[in-house]
Image: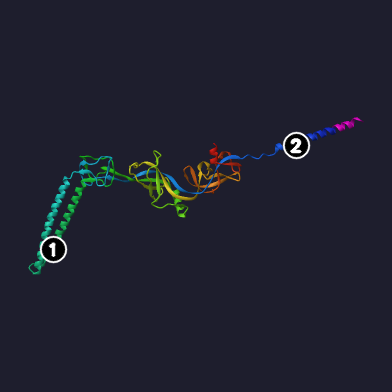
Amino acid sequence: MSIRPSFKLMGIATLALALVSCDSEQPAGSAAQAPQKPQATPVNTVVLKTETINLIEEMPGRTVAFREIDVRPQVDGIIEKRTFEEGALVEQGQPLYQIDQAVYKASLDAAKAELASEQANLNYAQKTRDRYKKLIKTQASSQQNYDNAVADYAQALAAVAEARAKVDQAEINMNYTTVVAKITGKIGTSEYNEGSLVTTSQTLAMTTITQLDPIYVDVTQAGGRLLKIKQAVQSGRVQGLKEGEIEVSLIMDATGEQYNHKGVLKFSDVTVNETTGTVRLRAVFPNPNHDLLPGMFVRGLVNQGELEGAIAVPQKATMRRPDGSAYVYVVEEGKVAIKDIVIEQAQAGNWIVTAGLKEGDQLIVDGLQRIGPGSPVAAQPLETATAEK
């Protein structure tokens, strides 16, 4: 009878100790299961600003001779001498070849003699007409004789004109025996030399003259891009473009150096190349030292006007989706926000952006691989980060 109460007391004591033990362990467990606040990822940012940007587009191009002519004979004959050095600069009107003149001099002399004879006949016919004119007034001669004298005078007048034309033709042929340069430029290889027979019907040119100063540069631009620029100019979004005053610079493709002289855009083709979808633009450049030769590959930097309210965004801060649309990350209230952007063109390592961003936005340029939309970030200006390094 006395044993049961002691067992009951021991059970109550054990239960009390268990409850105390549970109460003492509960706070520690609760603290371990409480969620931790995520740490902000450090990123480098730049503060964007709007500005007026000169649109300069780089286009592939090739140099083209300003003028190039084939020198061909205009009379038949044997070349007596060549009066130029191959590859030299020749001036307009400078003699190049001398063709044997003997035949043409004889023809000129014969034409002059015929003209003198016809002029003598004309003088006789004129005197006869005048004499019959006086006689008919006194009825000393018939009207028929006077009419015949007038007709003879007219025929003699026509014969003199024909003879004079023959003299002119003979003189022209005589002058053609001296082949002269029609333009100023560099002369090429001579295909004919002393003793060679040349004819007016030959297919091979005697030589070629190329005018190098000034020189044309043909560049190509995507047809859609050209249309976009024209629409931007018409809407007033792009300014500073005046026809005949569009400046063009050149980068030498072989050396990567910039050409010393600037050119002016002259015109663009009115058709789009069906194969490439491009339009040809032609610029003219001064070439006083003949540094540019026809056929050279160059890159043209074409001024396409001033774009107001644009933002320059570093290309490394820009990402693209599979469909090609571009976007960037900016910092808003300590978190990453995604912004879709509209790109006008590339320029000096930047994208020129016309929509999607505003002045004052904090653009994330470094640490992009460690963040995503909504991630907390600790923004650090790029200039400060560079100085600390």
Estimate the x, y position of residue 259 in percent, counting from the top left: 38, 42
Secondary structure at badge 2 equals helix
Work out whether residue 149 can be spotted: yes
Farthest residue, direction left: 140
- Residue 85 in the figure: left or right of residue 128: right
Looking at the rendered structure, the kind of residue marked 1 is: Val
Considering only vertical position in the picture, is 151 above or below 332? Answer: below
Estimate the x, y position of residue 78 in percent, counting from the top left: 20, 42
Quadrant of the image containing the N terminus: top right
Name the chief secondary structure element in magenta.
helix
Residue where numbered disc 2 is placed: 26
Q: Choose the circle earlier in sequence order: 2 or 1.
A: 2
The reply to whether dot 2 and dot 1 touch (C-beta < 8 Å) is no
| Bounds of the magenta segment | 1-10
At 14% from the left edge and 50% from the top edge, which residue is drawn?
110
Q: CA distance from mark 2 to mark 1?
A: 147 Å
- Residue 276 in the figure: left or right of residue 168: right
How packed mark 2 is, by other alpha carbons closer than 10 Å (few <14, some 14-19, many 20 or more), is few
Residue where numbered disc 1 is placed: 150
Considering only vertical position in the picture, is 186 above or below 244? Answer: above
